[in-house]
Image: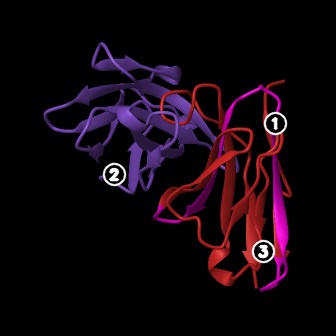
Chain colours: A red, B purple
Amino acid sequence: EAQVTQNPRYLITVTGKKLTVTCSQNMNHEYMSWYRQDPGLGLRQIYYSMNVEVTDKGDVPEGYKVSRKEKRNFPLILESPSPNQTSLYFCASSLLGGGTGELFFGEGSRLTVL
Amino acid sequence: AQSVTQLDSQVPVFEEAPVELRCNYSSSVSVYLFWYVQYPNQGLQLLLKYLSGSTLVKGINGFEAEFNKSQTSFHLRKPSVHISDTAEYFCAVSEKETSGSRLTFGEGTQLTVNP
């Protein structure tokens, strides 16, 4: 089954404790992206990757890092989480790129930073 | 840079009534337009998209949208809604010049279908 898998789905952590949210897709998509969803703000893009070893900032990259060492994986790293990073995070992938192709989303990772 | 405004944050309707969810965009160049739906506790899935050609686009689950370039709008419509259409709907835009990288979402419209 074609899917985008995120882990963990739920996480409560404390300020400053490094964490990684993993994202994996099995569709051989070149494009992958991370979004955060906050009430009243819709989805905002954090980082995206057009291909292996190619990443770029989205609209809200501060406080986040990403890497794309393999085509299927695109982890999101919070080096020193803060409460304002409490949010619902979505990973998405696309064959043709985020602007023209259909985005396939994971089920989301709800992160709470205390 | 592109932007999207969804004009209604919440739209309550009765079952079998028609519905329109409004979306306006802003961009200085040609755009691609999308509607995504998010059911409770799930990720988003594509409803329909406009890339080029006919301005009336049909999607899944009986939804359709019309691209109006002069009014910079891409409103979503369904002639008769069901309880199962209750979800949050997101309009999104990308600029053709940067296609492949930047998809900007609106704030979302919560559609609630009541019996």
**Residue at mark 1 to residue at mark 2: CA–CA distance:** 30 Å
Outermost residue on the front side: it is A53
Q: Name the residue under label 2.
A: B3
Left or right for A21, reference B91: right
Reply above or below: A73 against B30: below
Where residue A86 appears, as percent x and y from the top left, is 67, 74
State the image quarter where residue B94 is shown.
top left
Report the amino acid beneath label 1: Arg
What element does badge 3 sit on?
A: loop
Chain to which the residue tagged by mark 2 belongs: B
Residue in the image at 43% along x and 42% along y: B92
State the image quarter where residue A28 is shown.
top right
Residue in the image at 44% along x and 48% along y: B104
Chain to which the residue tagged by mark 1 belongs: A
Identify which residue, B80 or B7, lies in the foreground. Answer: B7
What element does badge 1 sit on?
A: loop
Nearest to N terminus: mark 3 or mark 1? 1
Q: Name the residue under label 1.
A: A72
